[in-house]
Amino acid sequence: MNTSADMPNSALAALIPDVDRLATEAMAVWKVPGVALAIVQDGDVALTRAYGQRDVEADLPVTPQTHFVICSITKSFTATAVALLHNDGLLDWSKPVRDYLPEFRLSDAVATERVTIRDLLSHQSGLPRHDWIHMPGDLSPAEMLPLMRHLELSRDIRAAWQYNNLCYNVAGLLIERLSGQSFEAFLRRRLTDRLRMNVSFSVDELEVGPEPARPYMIDVNTRLPALRLPIRTTAAGAINTSVADLANWMRLHLGKGEFAGERLLPVELIGQLHAPLAFVAKSEFSEFGHGHYALGFQTNTYQGERIVSHSGGWIGWGTLMTLGPDAGIGVAVLTNRSPSEVTSILTYYIIDRLRGREPVDWLARFRKMRDDFIAHIPADKEAREKTRHKDTKPAHELAAYAADYAHPAYGVISIREQEGALHWSWRGMSAPLSHRHFETFVTPEIVGELHPDNLPISFQTDRDGNIVHLSAPLEPMVKDIVFERQAAGACTDPAFRQRCAGHFRSGSVNHHVILDPDGRLLLKPDFQPTYRLEPQQGRRFSIVELDGFAVEFRGEHDQIDQIVFHQPNGVFVADRIADQE
């Protein structure tokens, strides 16, 4: 069922049947359940149009008032909100983030001090995506901020564009700090209310609001209902609204900061928001120029004309907003399916027609690319299987891998042995692991759930053969993320540690083991400083001040009568002696 709003002019009226046919065909190919689009021209909403179903199971139609998650189009709102604060004199976006948010930290001390607010907004912090920090949806925006200091950078500051939702999360926290309001309240008061936009900022709000769309995903070529997955980096992608309301956002930016006769932002700041800052890539298609990122907007040329845009994608949602500032044209396309080329097909067909050009057959181009991709999936799976070293076995019994492994930002991965196999669980996700080869296991493919499919998990041992780490490529632009094995066994038992205290001798050297008031063990060898012993595994402790050194307490039953020193230069023992007077 199609609906339209606003009386189109004759040129648009002639366009409608062709757009309807194209939308119907593209939606069928990509199995998109619902689409809503809006066209802004010469300062007005020239046309809104809607196709398909916002809820397939309930057979509810999409209308121009249907609310979608607009995903990363949200970034244009966040950057514009920062521009408002800049215009108010509450911040200078060319200054370092830490001038306004002192607790902001990156893993590199120089980058921490140098990254500016504009670097955050143009994705030039040096930090790659690290999306698995926020994707499980178990952390609030504020809880993610201190984790960033533990994330490896992949480039130097301003050396390259690297898309990053966590940095936009920081921008949202910055807005809250300087405005004294929540991110949501500030956007409503200074932007969306003045634009007469009905917006919300969470899955819960979407579902109880007006005309919510339901998300859908694709498994190869089968459409399925998608997860109800929250976006916790609110300022990076969580706004929900309708295409009719989003048209007013396009009017503001095409109007260079003015809407319905009211100026919300100076012309020069709109120009800065739209100005290219960071080179992204050269398109494979000759119709496009070199892509750049501005401040919350992507910039390029299409058929020789400047375009300013932002796409959005999340599990179950795909969106695109495109402005032709010099032509006074804006097109927004919202869908309730995981990102597909349908948004681009409709957008560039409409722009071509409105600019009086013969339209590029984007549907044919993208359909061939899609068909080739699907046809190649079996070959990719076969190639992955061929890289596996067959007929290998784990180096340990499965029970030896069972433990909790922690990373200061990524959290805790729990490995357990169940029914003759290893199982992993991590931040609400869980699954059995299969042995890939040697010390590497792999997660399964789980359709319809949030889960890192085909993720290799490799275990590492120390020189004594103890499993001490696991690692996984959760961020492909840096080294594998290393999770440290957490202490477990007798070493964590206060009663056991108490039995370890006493005096031991190795040759002529005395080793005094002391229990401090907090129940921690200290080791004082003759003629050496006092060392702290950190629980490790079983009866084993690491020596905190000496990397690679560990001690193990041995004895029968409840008696501890020997220390074994595990050192880079060998293994040594010390026997308990009677307490000295």
Image: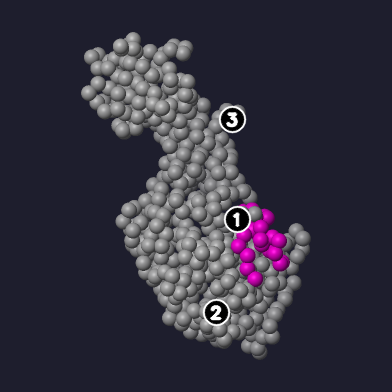
Farthest-out residue, right? 58
Could you classify mark 2 by the number of other residues whose Cα lies within 10 Å: few (under 14), some (14-19), or many (20 or more)? many
- The image position of residue 350, as x and y in percent, is 58, 79
Badge 2 marks a residue whose secondary structure is helix
Q: Name the residue under label 1.
A: 230
- The image position of residue 194, as x and y in percent, is 59, 77
Dots 2 and 3: beta carbons under 8 Å?
Answer: no
Q: Earlier in the sequence, mark 1 or mark 2?
A: 1
Q: Point out the frontmost of discs 2 and 3.
A: 2
Task: Indicate yes or no whether the magenta region holds residue 193.
Answer: no
Could you classify mark 3 by the number of other residues whose Cα lies within 10 Å: few (under 14), some (14-19), or many (20 or more)? few
**Most foreground residue, 221 or 179:** 179
How far apart, in angstroms, are the residues tagged by discs 2 and 3? Answer: 58 Å
Q: Which amino acid does label 3 sit on?
A: Gln
- Image height of 450 relative to 197, above or below: above
Using residue 375 as the reference point, say whether residue 464 is left or right of it. Answer: left
- Image height of 182 relative to 229, above or below: below
Q: Can residue 397 be seen in this view?
A: yes
Image point 44% across, 51% down: which residue? 146
- The figure's colour scheme reads one colour
Image point 51% across, 85% down: which residue? 327
Farthest-out residue, top? 578
Q: Name the residue under label 3.
A: 418
Q: Name the residue under label 2.
A: 252
Image point 49% across, 37% down: which residue? 441
The magenta segment is 198-227
Occupied quadrant, residue 569: top left
Badge 3 marks a residue whose secondary structure is strand
Image point 46% across, 59% down: which residue? 170
**Most foreground residue, 83 or 405:** 83
